[in-house]
Every structure is written in structure tokens, then in C-alpha cells.
């Protein structure tokens, strides 16, 4: 069994030392850590993970009830057991109502204490295990639309995971079709903000005269036709993530206002007189050379550096054919599709093979042509490409000269 971690918080040093010795001997898979004051305890909880905390209800500086609230605020998933004297049972019951798991009364018998602690440790283990499994499922779902396990793609996945645990502003750069929005969505889905909707706006798709209102909102009467208050995307994304897609096309007139939002995390709606505090994580993407636009004075340098805290480049890389074949075959929507050992693609495709039922095989010797698409729309392999009139495929094998029939 993996080692678990128990934190004991009590201002009585002799009690701490005695408990630590006994529990270290009795709970051989548990690492016991002690703290004599709330400040020390909160520092430990902020830097380490504990399955169980044993907390004395009477503490100097900060009483046990207030400390319990601070602990659960720092780590809502930790299991807390309160220690109390006989005369304060009511207080211990109140602590359970506020989030503690159980309580023990002083002086306590060691067998009784061990029984309660073992239950608490088991609860803590199950909670951590559940959280770990959820994180793995969330990670798999977040990368479900990506193709490839090559070294560059693995580095991209690692970078996304690292960025997801921060609140940094990220500038995602790359050619059209390389998956910039997929990267942004994955960062959001793996972050603490994932419970709220991910919002995105395509800046050049909105007319310049409407973009300010769309981003920052407006007050009733701010301009002709403004009959009601309107909540902009920044305010709507409060607590979540907002992607500014193709940020290089945002008008210079709005860049100053955007810079203020990034710097101060506050905005003022069009026609408003008061600023509003917001908590929005900003991600931006572009396929343009922003440094060149800075030299041309069509993009603010200070805004560029505010956006460019971290830069990601989801470039296309020639993938191994196996994953890309599978992605294309799954995209047919045919429930009978399978894969031959060795990576031979197979789809039930009477419309391609001219047979019913029929099969169309994608053989490795003839599948190398897929590599040519590695640097074009790798994140979206031929999805959304112009549809061609399907050509007839003779026989049961799809060769490189037949690839037009796939699209």
C-alpha cells in the first residue's frame, strides 16, 4: 500500500511527541507530521498533501473551528478529525456540521483512537484515489481530438498540462488549421476553471463597430439602438477562460482597453461610469507575425508583452500513419470499423468498394502518402475539407492513387 500522510496539530508539545511515537509504530504505512501552531500547520497544508489531519479544537492564536475553516478552504478534500475535551462535545458536533469527519475525546484510549484514525485514513485514501482517476479521465477527454504520440506531440501535451495548472496568459501561435483552439480548450478543460463554460470569440469575424460592445458590454443608451444593458464576453467569462481568436486582427482603437483588462482585471462597459472587477483567464491565438505588426505600428508592443507571457506553437508534425488512419476511419461514423493487426485500416465501405458488405483496406506500403498531410491541418485531419466527388475504388484495397475517394 502506498504511504499515507497524517498531520497532527496541537499546542501541547508532550502530547504531540507521544502521539507521534505511538502512531508511527502502530500505523506502519503512515508518515506522521506534527505542528504546534496554526501558522505552521497552514504552511504545511499549502505545500504538502495529507490524507488525514488530527486537529485539537483549542488552539492559541486561531481556535480550532476557525482553523478548520482555513484548512478546508486550502484543501477541501482533506479528512479532518477533531480532538476535544469531555466538556466540549457540543463544539465537536458543530465542527462536524462545518466539515470535520469525526472527533475523539481527551483523554483517549489508544485502541479507540486507532480505530477512528484508520477509518479516516481509508476515507482519505478513497478520496485521493477518486480524484486521481477523475483527473486521468479528464486528461484523456481533453486530448481526445488530438492525433499522434510522437515526441513533439508528447511535448505539446506536457506543456498544456503544465499551463493548465497556472493562470498565465498564453499566446498560441500557428498557421490556420494547426489546432490553436484545441490547445486553448485543452488548457481550460484541465484547469480549475473547467466547471464553467469555455468562451471563444473570433475577433475578425465581428465588425469593428460592434467588437467593443461584444467584448466589454454596454449600458442602456450608450449608443443608438442600445435599448438595454448588455453583458460582454469578458464579464460573461468571469471565473472562466476566454479565448481571443486571431488577436492580431483586433483594431488598434480597442487594444488600449484590452490592455487595461489584462493589467488590472477590471473593465468598464461602453457608456458605463464604474469599473467592474473580473476574474478571467485570457488565452489568445494568432496566425500572424505580431512582431512585424508592431514595427508597422498596427499592434501595441505593450499589449504584445502582456499577451506573450507564455507562447505555444502547435505546429503540424508528420504523424505516424497508424493514429491518423484510425482518426480518419473513426470519422466515417461507421460502427463496424476495425483495425487489422499491424495497423492495416479497415472500414465497412460499400460506397467505396462497390460491394455490399465490403471492406476497404489501407495498406502500410500505400499509406505513406498520409505523411504528406502532416504539416497541413494535422489537428483536423481533412475534417471540413472541400468534398470531392467520390471516385470508384476497384478491388478491396485503397492505394495512394485512390485517396481522393476518401474525401
Image: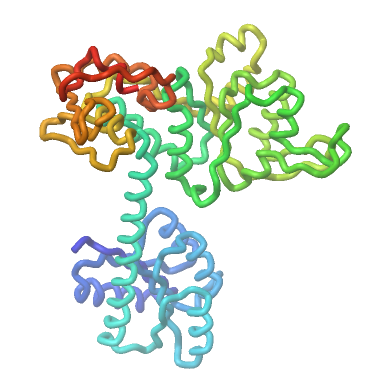
The quarter of the displayed image where residue 220 is located: top right
Q: How many marks?
A: 0
Residue under the image location 56 percent in, 71 percent down: 66
In the current view of this chain or complex, which residue is farthest to the left? 341
**Quadrant holding the N terminus:** bottom left
User: Toward the viewer: 210 or 349?
Assistant: 349
Q: State the image coordinates of residue 165 (x, y, percent, origin top left).
A: 44, 43
Residue under the image location 36 percent in, 51 percent down: 135
Q: State the image coordinates of residue 55 (x, y, percent, origin top left).
A: 43, 74
The quarter of the displayed image where residue 216 is located: top right
Q: Is residue 333 above or below residue 290?
A: below
Residue under the image location 39 percent in, 21 percent down: 377
User: Toward the viewer: 246 or 206?
Assistant: 206
Left or right for 109, reference 79? left
Q: State the image coordinates of residue 347 (x, y, percent, origin top left).
A: 23, 33
Left or right for 368, reference 105? left
The quarter of the displayed image where residue 269 is located: top right
**Quadrant holding the C terminus:** top left
Amino acid at each position: 500500500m502506498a504511504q499515507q500522510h497524517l498531520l497532527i496539530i496541537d499546542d501541547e508539545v508532550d502530547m504531540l511527541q507521544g502521539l507521534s511515537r505511538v502512531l508511527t509504530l502502530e500505523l506502519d504505512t503512515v508518515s506522521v507530521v506534527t505542528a504546534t501552531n496554526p501558522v505552521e500547520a497552514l504552511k504545511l497544508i499549502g505545500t504538502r498533501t495529507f490524507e488525514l489531519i488530527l486537529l485539537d479544537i483549542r488552539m492559541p492564536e486561531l481556535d480550532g473551528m476557525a482553523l478548520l475553516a482555513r484548512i478546508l478552504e486550502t484543501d477541501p478534500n482533506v479528512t479532518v478529525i477533531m480532538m476535544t475535551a469531555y466538556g466540549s462535545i457540543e463544539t465537536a458536533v458543530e465542527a462536524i456540521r462545518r466539515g470535520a469527519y469525526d472527533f475523539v475525546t481527551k483523554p483517549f484510549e489508544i485502541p479507540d483512537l486507532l480505530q477512528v484514525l484508520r477509518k479516516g485514513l481509508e476515507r482519505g485514501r478513497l478520496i485521493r484515489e477518486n480524484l486521481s482517476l477523475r483527473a486521468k479521465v479528464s486528461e484523456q477527454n481533453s486530448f481526445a481530438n488530438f492525433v499522434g504520440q510522437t515526441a513533439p506531440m508528447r511535448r505539446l501535451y506536457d506543456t498544456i498540462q503544465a499551463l493548465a495548472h497556472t493562470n498565465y496568459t498564453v499566446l498560441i501561435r500557428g498557421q490556420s488549421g494547426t489546432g490553436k483552439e484545441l490547445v486553448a480548450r485543452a488548457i481550460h478543460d484541465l484547469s480549475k476553471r473547467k466547471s464553467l463554460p469555455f468562451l471563444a470569440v473570433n475577433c475578425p469575424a465581428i465588425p469593428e463597430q460592434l467588437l467593443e460592445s461584444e467584448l466589454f458590454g454596454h449600458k442602456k443608451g450608450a449608443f443608438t439602438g442600445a435599448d438595454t444593458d448588455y453583458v460582454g464576453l469578458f464579464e460573461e467569462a468571469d471565473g472562466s477562460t476566454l479565448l481571443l481568436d486571431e488577436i492580431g486582427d483586433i483594431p488598434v482603437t480597442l487594444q488600449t482597453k484590452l490592455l487595461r483588462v489584462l493589467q488590472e482585471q477590471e473593465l468598464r462597459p461602453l457608456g458605463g461610469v464604474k469599473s467592474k472587477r473580473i476574474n478571467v483567464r485570457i488565452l489568445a491565438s494568432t496566425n500572424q507575425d505580431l512582431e512585424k505588426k508592431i514595427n508597422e505600428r498596427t499592434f501595441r508592443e505593450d499589449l504584445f508583452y502582456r499577451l506573450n507571457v507564455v507562447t505555444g506553437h502547435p505546429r503540424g508534425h508528420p504523424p505516424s500513419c497508424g493514429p491518423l488512419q484510425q482518426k480518419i476511419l473513426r470519422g466515417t461514423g461507421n460502427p463496424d470499423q476495425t483495425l487489422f493487426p499491424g495497423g492495416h485500416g479497415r472500414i465497412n465501405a460499400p460506397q467505396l468498394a462497390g460491394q455490399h458488405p465490403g471492406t476497404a483496406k489501407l495498406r502500410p506500403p500505400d499509406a505513406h502518402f498520409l505523411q504528406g498531410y502532416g504539416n497541413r491541418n494535422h489537428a483536423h485531419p481533412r475534417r471540413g475539407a472541400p468534398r470531392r466527388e467520390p471516385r470508384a475504388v476497384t478491388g478491396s484495397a485503397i492505394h495512394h492513387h485512390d485517396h481522393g475517394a476518401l474525401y
